[in-house]
């Protein structure tokens, strides 16, 4: 059940990606994947390399996913901005 909470929180954080320029690796779809993967991996690591069951799922599980989703988005943004820097194409 916590896995569902982590994924849903990753999707919720992903919605805020519209407020920054689209330099994510893979565009907005890449940002979607990065937010979900970041939230799940971070939740998995904080959860002791396991997924808490239904009776162990509390509000803290949603809060745990927030830094992971933001971290995944940040890594995707940095990777995307370095692979295609602004002004690298010459349009003459």
Image: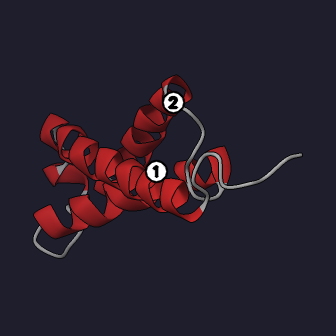
* Residue that extends furthest to the top in the rendered view of this protein: 19
Kindly tell me whether residue 27 is visible in this rendering. Answer: yes
Q: Nearer the viewer, residue 61 or 85?
A: 85
Residue drawn 47% across the image and 62% down it:
79
- Is 49 above or below relative to 61? below
Residue drawn 36% across the image and 50% down it:
74
User: Which one is closest to the eye, mark 2 or mark 1?
Assistant: 1
Residue 23 drawn at (x, y percent): 57, 46
How much space separates mark 2 and mark 1, taking CA atoms? 14 Å
* Residue that extends furthest to the bottom in the rendered view of this protein: 49
- Residue under label 2: 15
In terms of sequence position, does the residue under pointer 2 or pointer 1 come before the other? 2
- Residue under label 1: 77
Q: Nearer the viewer, residue 81 or 15?
A: 81
Disc tally is 2
- Colour theme: secondary structure
In the drawing, does residue 6 fall left or right of residue 50? right
Quadrant assignment, res 75: bottom left
């Amino acid at each position: 059940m916590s896995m569902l909470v982590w994924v849903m929180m990753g999707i919720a954080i992903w919605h805020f990606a519209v407020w920054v320029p689209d330099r994510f690796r893979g565009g907005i779809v890449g940002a979607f994947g990065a937010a979900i993967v970041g939230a799940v991996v971070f939740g998995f690591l904080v959860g002791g390399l396991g997924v808490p069951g239904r009776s162990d799922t509390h509000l803290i599980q949603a809060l745990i996913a927030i830094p992971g989703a933001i971290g995944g988005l940040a890594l995707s943004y940095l990777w995307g901005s370095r692979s295609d820097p602004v002004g690298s194409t010459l349009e003459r």
